[in-house]
Amino acid sequence: MTRAIPPPIDRRRLLCGGAALGLSSLAASPGRGLAATGPAEESLGALAAAKGLRFGASFATHELDAPYGPAYSELYAREARMITSELELKLFTLRPDALTLDFAPADRLLAYAQESDLALHGHTLVWNDGLPDWMKRLSPGEIRHLLDAHLMSVLERYRDGIPTWDVVNEPIAPWDRLPGNLRGGAFYEAMGEDYIAQSFRLAREYAPRCKLILNEAQTESDDENGRVFRESFLALVKRLTSEGVPIDGIGLECHLDTKRPYDFPRFAAYIEELATLVPDIAISEFDVNDRSLPDDIAQRDVAVADIYRRFLGAVLAVKAVRRLTLWQLADHTSWMYYDDARENPASGRRPRPLPFDDRFQPKRARAAIAEALAAMPAR
Ligand code: XIL
């Protein structure tokens, strides 16, 4: 079988970026640019901060261009203290083809965060999923070079504006049937498990003052899938920390699903165990998939809020949990909503996974978060 000849990589363009905007355009403006509509002390961000917890949600700049953009922005200014980049810093956004390094979306997000006085969390530098097709044509040597060049160019540009990073995302995927239940993909195929340690070491070198995080999904459910994820991830963290790999924090995504079984106290005990290895844990992408619940909106909202209450009650009791990030704040901006609208365009039912509805009004889940924040111990 013949192999397609990979396109040459222009090292200078990879390192410097073609369409880069000047960083001078990112100067911070003082204070919150947007008026808060509720009393600040009652916002979720303020309730969390009073206990030493950072609260926020993922954010996507394309939502600012929607008719509801100003209301979206106001909601974040009011409720959040930090945002996680949902799309803008992913490799497929930054590198749409082999020769382009497009910083414009990430520059826009950072400028927005600074104007709005929201801390920005970088998601994600290295991920074996969601990689652009052009990477499939690269040789192992070119992938290794790309990893280094990518970390260097992104971190040198943003290390002063973005203090915390998911360096490696979702290293575990048992269905790939690889040693350690690691996820396959371009970086794994080129470098084996070492792509993880190498990513953290390079990130430390290029951004010595940034906080470097290992982020993982699917560790929460009380079933075989959750058990395998928990054990495989814990074993990986043990290997990495025993080798002195510079991991400053762990993110546990927590995309919950009402059709799965949970034992939240047991999951909290798992977090305590992880925290003996890396004592700084984030719930990094929390939301609740309501697909198995009845259509009735009031019933669904009660059941989803009950999961919020029970889940947060258990995990926020663990003081090593220092950050709570939701995956968006309002239902119609959730990834689940977009997927559902694409897959079932005619459906009259849409997912309601988040604390605010499609008019940015608070739901029962918002009250459940506020109660959990008020009840948890201070960090
Ligand atoms: C999702 C985004 O929400 C979608 O908009 C995008 O199309 C795909 O990625 N785990 C992660 C996130 O770490 O990056 C994913 O975000 C959700 C699952």
Image (cartoon, rainbow, N blue to C red):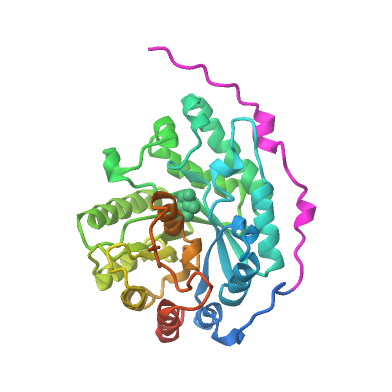
Q: Can residue 150 be seen by looking at this rendering?
A: yes
Where is 324 relative to 219, above or below? below
Query: Seen from this angle, which residue lies furthest top?
Result: 2
Q: Nearer the viewer, residue 247 or 79?
A: 79
In the image, what residue occupies the spot 38% across and 39% down?
Answer: 193
In the image, what residue occupies the spot 48% across and 24% down?
Answer: 139
Q: Nearer the viewer, residue 336 or 83?
A: 336
Q: Position of residue 281 (x, y in %)?
A: 43, 65
Q: Nearer the viewer, residue 358 or 183?
A: 358
Image quarter (top left, top right, bottom left or bottom right) of the N terminus: top left
Q: Position of residue 135 (x, y in %)?
A: 50, 31
Instruction: Tell me which secondary structure the magenta stretch mostly adopts.
Output: loop
**Magenta-colored span:** 1-30
Is residue 9 located in the magenta-colored stretch of the structure? yes
* Left or right placement of residue 294 versus residue 24 in this view: left
Identify the image quadrant of residue 219.
Answer: bottom left
Where is 173 relative to 353, above or below? above
Q: Where is residue 248 in the image (x, y as percent from the top left)?
A: 48, 59
In the image, what residue occupies the spot 31% across and 68% down?
Answer: 295
Is residue 11 located in the magenta-colored stretch of the structure? yes
Q: Can residue 245 be seen by looking at this rendering?
A: no
Where is 227 relative to 295, above or below? above
Query: Seen from this angle, which residue lies furthest left?
Result: 224
Identify the image quadrant of residue 81.
Answer: bottom right
